Image: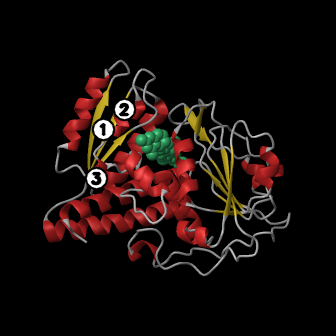
Amino acid sequence: MATVWHQWIRKSIQSSSTLRAVHTLKVDPSQPMLKSPPLISLDLPDVWTSNVMDFDPPSIGECSNERRARVIDGKLMAEKIRAGIAGEVIRMKESIGKVPGLAVILVGHRRDSQTYVRNKRKACEEAGIKFAMAILPDSCTKDEVCEALSSFNGNPSVHGILVQLPLPDHLDEEKILNLVSLEKDVDGFHPLNMGNLAMRGREPLFIPCTPKGCIELLVRSGVDIMGKKAVRHHATVSTVHALTSNPEQITREADIVISAAGVPNLVRGTWLKPGAVVIDVGTCPVEDPNSEHGYRLMGDVCYEEAVMVASAITPVPGGVGPMTIAMLLVNTLNSAKRAFNFH
Ligand SMILES: Nc1nc(=O)c2c([nH]1)NC[C@@H]1CN(c3ccc(C(=O)N[C@@H](CCC(=O)O)C(=O)O)cc3)C=[N+]21
């Protein structure tokens, strides 16, 4: 399972349009997939998971045409998690007089990146997490990015560093990401964190926010697919990408479909097994003069079709995006707790 997520993450962060990946998770049908909700999911404290289940678990394979899929509300889930983090930040401040800090490096002027960073800043401020940002022009040099990075690396009030991706083409993403201090790698993109995530029995310091958010979405919806359990329960995972010859057929076998292709309406209703759980990671900005910032986000899944076939589905916006941000705050809080030895 861990290996699979590693591949998934690697693909999901390569946002190039040449890579169109749809990732499907297939669960062994002889094993019951739905169980009572776990008390603790991932490494979040109980405070966020004591009330894990907001709804009845979806019944896979029992979705009739008259019933629309349950909409998994990532926005609401993320709000609850962020409220829990705010409480933890207050507890930290009251007992040791310190708060967590997140630093973001934003290069260039992509509108979507600006929106995501703005959302991250707002979420930090609401939770009492200090937020710092270095904004660099499209034309900046590698040395300028490195300088910003090393100043954040050396700053003891910064516990998490995030380099917003994608970077402009002339900058070497790999070289730059390698410089993020391992202890502050809240995106989980450092090769050592990635490697530990991929290897059985090893614990990465950080799990990348989007996949971590997807797992949380599933677990909190009563779909039991936690990493370790999935391995033990022989989950079978298929990866579908741009060069897969029969993506529709493979996807149709999946009980859980996690799509991260960045191609609007790629996943049609006919691609889905009735009753499947659909997690839409796609965030493709498309022009929309009527919306606030001149564009809106589109997922990979043809929502109106999928909602008639699936048993549960995440919307875009309001699904994975807000959970990604909530997980970033979780990672930042946990990093600060480690730095201060405060638990
Ligand atoms: N180093 C790095 N880490 C990332 O985690 C990372 C990144 N680079 N580059 C881009 C992707 C994408 N991503 C999103 C974050 C928030 C929303 C989000 O807030 N979405 C809202 C709506 C956004 C809006 O207001 O338009 C929603 O879906 O409801 C979406 C997508 C993080 N990424």
Which residue occupies 55% across, 35% down?
15
Q: Secondary structure at mark 2?
A: helix
Is 115 positioned to the left or the right of 340 in the image? right
Amino acid at circle 1: Leu
Which residue occupies 65% across, 42% down?
21
Question: Marks 2/3: CA distance?
Answer: 17 Å
- Residue behind mark 3: 183
Q: Quadrant of residue 163?
A: top left
Q: Secondary structure at mark 3?
A: helix
Seen in the picture, residue 246 relative to 167 is either above or below; the reply is: below
Seen in the picture, residue 174 relative to 255 is either above or below; the reply is: above
Q: Residues within 10 Å of mark 3 (few under 14, many from 20)?
A: some
Q: Position of residue 243 (x, y in %)?
A: 72, 36
Amino acid at circle 2: Lys
- Residue behind mark 1: 179
Q: Quadrant of residue 97?
A: bottom left
The tag earlier along the polypeptide, 2 or 3, is 2
Asked if labels 3 and 2 touch by Cβ distance under 8 angstroms, the answer is no
Residue 331 in view of the camera: yes
Seen in the picture, residue 332 relative to 89 is either above or below; the reply is: above
Which residue occupies 42% across, 63% down?
202
- Residue behind mark 2: 175
